[in-house]
Amino acid sequence: MRRTVPAVLLAVVILLAGVLLAAPASARPSPGGGSGVPLPNSMAAVGDSITRAFDATAAGCLLSDCPQYSWSTGAAGSSSVNSHYLRILAANRRIRGQVWNQAKTGAKMADLDGQLRTAAGLGVQYATVLMGANDVCTSSAATMTPTATFASQFQTALADFFAADPSARVFVSSIPNIYQLWSLEHTNPTAELEWQTFGICQSMLSSASTEADRQAVVAQEQADNNVLAAVCQQFAGCRWDNLATYDYTFRTSDVSTVDYFHPSVSGQNTLAGITWSASYWPTTR
């Protein structure tokens, strides 16, 4: 009897080892950087022109999208933008090539549901959201998206996404501080000319806007960021950046020298770092 017990135990150990080795790689969770949340094997970005890296200050990015420099899904193959995708890839090779950028230049919160539905259809395990700038950046302060409408649209988008896969994860960035951008660049004659010529965010950036107009935009943006926080908190799989993006103070180098509104390549990299530090895996580099 004393000899048979170790033999049985050895057989059990061998059997368990064989089961673990036979498990497919996709079924094994990746380390989560201390967060307890496994790194995803697939991801998508949703949002607007910021996430499409529109007008990033780089060759080939004049008045066009340059998603290879996106803060979220960029994969330019250089150290210019250390995106969420590249950071995850460095620790989890199973995500290689399983990345999509569903953002669209000009998109508003009304478009988020469709973008997230597409992402859900691709079976992504992780999605980043940066949406809302175009809801406050309109032709005038009077034409901004009402807060209640904004909230309903965001609620619907997240509900539909998590209905497709309750185990998926979403990261929600706050809307960048547009007033701070105006404060940084409005004394630059070239920036003023670009904003007027291309009609960029006239609710805030128009030379005809009064301080009262701009403060109305500030109030609306703060209300929208409050909505993003409150709605996100209703879903267990949603993580809010706690105003990390909004609270960041822009530097001149962060801003495109094409339109003086969108992030430059350097700005995209800064945005990647700010949002990653507020993400599920801040200690994973």
Image (cartoon, helix red, strand yellow):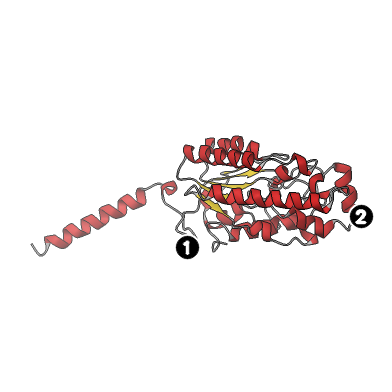
Closer to the camera in the image, 29 or 132? 132
Residue 116: horizontal and vertical position, in percent? 57, 39
**Badge number at residue 189:** 2
As drawn, the residue found furthest toward the left would be: 1
* Circle nearer the N terminus (2, 1): 1
Q: Amino acid at mark 2?
A: Pro
- Within 10 Å of disc 2 (Cα), the crowding (few <14, some 14-19, many 20+) is few
The answer to whether any part of residue 123 appears in the image is: no
Q: Which residue is mark 1?
A: 34
Residue 222: horizontal and vertical position, in percent? 67, 52
Q: Indicate which label's residue lies in the foreground, 2 or 1.
A: 2
Identify whether 146 is placed above or below 71. Answer: above
What residue is at 58 percent from the left and 59 percent from the top?
278
Closer to the camera in the image, 74 or 136? 136
The answer to whether any part of residue 277 appears in the image is: yes
Q: CA distance from mark 2 to mark 1?
A: 48 Å
User: Would residue 203 appear left or right of 97 to someone viewing this image?
Assistant: right
Closer to the camera in the image, 116 or 10? 116
Secondary structure beneath disc 1? loop
Q: Amino acid at mark 1?
A: Gly
Q: Quadrant of the C terminus?
A: bottom right
